[in-house]
Image (tube, helix red, strand yellow):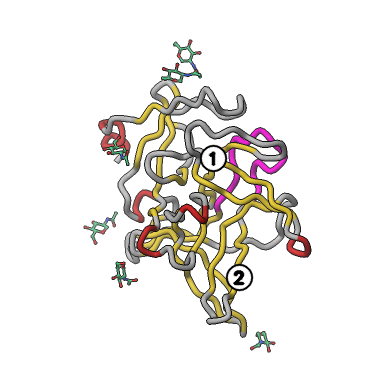
Amino acid sequence: MFRAILTVVGIVMSQVELAQAIPNVTVTPLPPTCASYPAYDNSTGQAGPWYLVADATGSSIDGFAATATYYTNPDFHRWGFITIPSVKATKNPAMRCANGTLQVQLSTGNNNTAWQDIVVAGDNNWQAGIGFAFPGDQSKDIPVQPYAHFINGTRQPGVFLGAKNVTTWYFKDNWAGNAGEYYLLRLWASGTELEEKDHAGFLKLVV
Ligand SMILES: *[C@@H]1O[C@H](CO)[C@@H](O)[C@H](O)[C@H]1NC(C)=O
Ligand SMILES: *[C@@H]1O[C@H](CO)[C@@H](O)[C@H](O)[C@H]1NC(C)=O
Ligand SMILES: *[C@@H]1O[C@H](CO)[C@@H](O)[C@H](O)[C@H]1NC(C)=O
Ligand SMILES: *[C@@H]1O[C@H](CO)[C@@H](O)[C@H](O)[C@H]1NC(C)=O
Ligand SMILES: *[C@@H]1O[C@H](CO)[C@@H](O)[C@H](O)[C@H]1NC(C)=O
Ligand SMILES: *[C@@H]1O[C@H](CO)[C@@H](O)[C@H](O)[C@H]1NC(C)=O
């Protein structure tokens, strides 16, 4: 498989405009199947469980695993964002790949959990945020996919999450009262400028 990856023409992203902490990597898509993710089980066709971890932000949140921040609409439609907490969380929702799709395990109350598909929002309202079940957004959702990073032709350890051949994320600082402070994660758009307290970085899958 490694050989197959190398034959794919890599995408060279100009990241000159990014914070210096971000390594200048060549982003190469991995086949969009569960076999591309860590801890793949050939007998089930699924990969995981693992955690999504902040990487290369050059700040204290590097290594922090993602949590889910979610809401329930009056019609019981549950939706939300995958976020990185500003203080290391003690309990993080597990993630997996099933049916070729990244999923997060959420509590549904009464000791039950459900696996929910993770996407990048395609509707402008959500500013390319990563999350799940965005209200009214289903037809426009952008699939998240696994990528490899190369520097000078050398594959960097790990599998990185991205979409549309972009693996850089905008970590948007958000203060949510009782829910605390966390970073919303938005797919990086070229030309974006970082605001104070925000970061740019990668999201890496860690077993
Ligand atoms: C990033 O790497 C690419 C190719 O490896 C190179 O062309 C480019 O100049 C590099 N950019 C920076 C800012 O180092
Ligand atoms: C994985 O599964 C495929 C199809 O089920 C099978 O052909 C292959 O031999 C399996 N590989 C291993 C390493 O078990
Ligand atoms: C896999 O995904 C397809 C397409 O979204 C869906 O129709 C199918 O029900 C899913 N299968 C399982 C086992 O989740
Ligand atoms: C959840 O599970 C715990 C331990 O098994 C049990 O004590 C508790 O009653 C359960 N709660 C509900 C709401 O079912
Ligand atoms: C990439 O290779 C060039 C030439 O061998 C070297 O000068 C440069 O330091 C390398 N960059 C990195 C990030 O390893
Ligand atoms: C991503 O890169 C692959 C190969 O490097 C290319 O075939 C594909 O068209 C690119 N996709 C997008 C959305 O740019």
Q: Around disc 2, counting alpha carbons within 10 Å, would you say few (fewer than 14), some (14 to 19), or many (20 or more)?
A: few
| Percent coordinates x, y for residue 123 in the rendering | 44, 56
User: Residue 202, which numbered label?
Assistant: 1
Is residue 98 depicted above or below 148 in this figure? below
Question: What are the residue bounds of the magenta stretch?
Answer: 52-64
Q: Foreground: 3 or 144?
A: 144
Image point 41% across, 52% down: which residue?
Answer: 144
The image quadrant where one finds ligand 3 is: bottom left
Amino acid carrying label 1: it is: Phe
| Percent coordinates x, y for residue 193 in the rendering | 59, 32
Residue 47 quadrant = bottom left
User: Residue 71, which numbered label?
Assistant: 2
Disc 2 secondary structure class: strand
Q: CA distance from mark 2 to mark 1?
A: 25 Å
Asked if the stretch drawn in magenta spans residue 156, the answer is: no
Q: Foreground: 102 or 178?
A: 178
| Percent coordinates x, y for residue 102 in the rendering | 43, 58
